[in-house]
Image (tube, coloured by chain):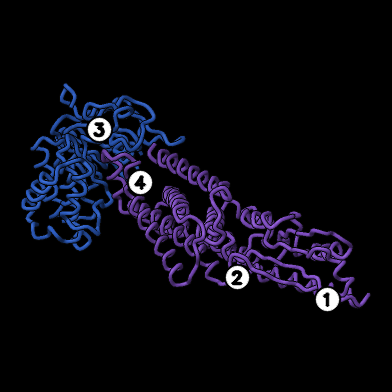
Amino acid sequence: MVILFGMPLVQVLLFGFAITNEIRDAKVSVVDPTPDAVTHALRNKLFASGFFIESEILNSQEEIAENFRKGESKMVVIFENNFSGKMERGEHPTVQLIADASDPNTASMLVNYANGIISEFNREQRAASGIPLIIAEPRMIYNPALKGVYMFVPGIITILLMLVSAMMTSISIAREKELGTMEVLLVSPLRPFNIIAGKVIPYVLLSFINAISILLLSYYVFGVPVKGSVLLLLAESILFIILALSLGIFISTIANNQQTAMMLSMFAMMLPTILLSGFIFPIENMPEVLQWLSLAMPPRWFIQIIKSIMLKGSGISYFWKETLILTFMAMIFIVASIRKFKIRLA
Amino acid sequence: MSSNGLVIEAENMVKRFGRFVANDNLTFSVSKGEIFGFLGANGAGKTTAIRILCGLSRPTSGKIRVAGYDVYTETEKIKRRIGYMSQRFSLYEDLTVIENFRFFGGIYGLKRAVIMERAQNMLSRLGIKHFENTVISELPLGIRQKLAFSVSILHTPELVFLDEPTGGVDPITRRQFWEMIHEAAASGITVFVTTHYMDEAEYCNRVSIMVDGKIEALDTPEKLKTKYQAQNMNEVFLKLARKTN
């Protein structure tokens, strides 16, 4: 009953709040080698818009690359050297807008907003003094063609692994309980650990094969690159599969029949995976409550990890934190399920 | 097996769920090769007691030994020596008859050849050898129950627990089922059976009758009938149930 009536409410709230494609408070870093009155005015205008918040001041190409790889900013605004000097000489100084297009929708929106602000700045300046235009030069990194597949592949892998691993295990264990075979297994000399392992291992293999086939398909058919280490990507996938499976086991210790298991997995996994993981709707745009909630969503961290490996080509040093979080979450679910399992037997 | 020939020894067995007492000081023993009927109305605490004896559930207090082992500390050893058939149907419906035998036999560590030999034996005695490769879900309930019982004694346990094995089964099949139980007992397997068909109680060597978590009577069907001046076990049961109400 709670699920029946609660589900629509939560869904409407989630969709209403999470699905805003507007940009708010996107992190933007600035490279301004020769700060002057004009660059300051333009920067102020950018950051006063409410769309962006200033993240860092960077000084070199290396710092920019590093910044993007760590995911510290969504866009970097680079002012040309000697900005106002050029303006005074009647040249057209350029502002480079480099956006992280591993999330192509957000990237193009950020660039559009920034473009708009710069052209408005241009209009004001010209009205005041007739100085020539500033030229905005957008550039997309990681996904220059803004292909949607780049975004969808990591998301689909995540959803699929979550679905196959968690939903299938929870349903198959719940099924055994429903049919009464679980009880017979428990009375047998098999240890609970063996029973669970027997249930889980087939799905680990299945999910792993799924992950590999998605990767191959996206690489050969859609040309989605894997810039980083394939081995690392597979290792992280296994970690995520284990996490999803332990979540599935946990669900099955709560649910006593297949229907509840199914509802719980849909509710506990599908919706958050799609809505709160940053897969489709950027996390930065969500209300703060949902942003906090998204911290607890395993897919959020996994999507970040695979995006960094596949599109940015970064190594473990850039996402050890995310990896640690996933490991930690997996451990929590495993411990919780073992506990639940024992209590059920007591 | 313990030295005194007792397969189950329970002394003051108590199980509490919060403030609800499901098993209130049960004391009874079952000897080897006996068919022990464990009777009681729904909710009288039968299933709880079985779960404790099988090692699925921990008793709150009491001294209990099954097959000579302690239910608190030696559940693993107990589990090797018992068979169990639950009131819910418990074979894999999407596997064939022989696959079920192989699976459950494998769990108890039986060799493939041994499983096949015993399974063939059991199937031909039941006269259903032609169903060997039939998927369980296609078989009628009566045959399924007989198979479930066969599977539960496949590993020749010392003791088999049958939790309402004949629920929803027609009278003829029930009779055949009891013949199987007697055969098993004759081969030395102790049978601990719960039921609420009182006519079945007559087939048991001894019966205990539980009312509201307590054992109200425990004796052979004959003696119980004399003691309560009843024609059959049904009357005994009704008298006992009324007495406590």
Residue position marked by numbered label 4 in the rendering: A196
Q: Chain of mark 4?
A: A
The correct choice, above or below, for B66 with respect to B245 in the image is above
Alpha carbon separation for disc pair 2 and 3 = 67 Å
Q: Is residue A315 left or right of residue B175?
A: right
Task: Have a look at marks 3 and 4 and say if they share a chain.
Answer: no
Q: Amino acid at mark 4?
A: Ile
A240 vs B82: above or below: below
How far is mark 4 from mark 2, CA to CA?
46 Å
Which is nearer the N-term, disc 4 or disc 2?
2
Q: Counting other residues with Cα less than 10 Å from the Cα at mark 2, is it few (<14), some (14-19), or many (20 or more)?
A: few
Between disc 4 and disc 1, the foreground one is: 1
**Where does label 1 land, which residue?**
A133
What kind of element bears circle 2?
A: loop
Residue A211 falls in which quadrant of the image? Answer: bottom left
Q: Which mark, by number, is residue A144?
A: 2
The residue furthest top is B3
Q: Is residue A38 visible?
A: yes
- Dots 1 and 2: beta carbons under 8 Å? no
Q: Of callouts 4 and 1, which one flags the residue occurring earlier in the amino acid sequence?
A: 1
- Given contact means CB atoms under 8 Å apart, are the residues at marks 2 and 3 in contact? no
Marks 1/2: CA distance? Answer: 26 Å
Residues packed near mark 4 inside 10 Å, few (<14), some (14 to 19) or many (20 plus): some
The amino acid pointed to by label 1 is Leu
Which chain does the residue under circle 2 lie in? Answer: A
> Quick check: A175 above or below B111?
below
Q: Among the chains, which one is blue?
A: B
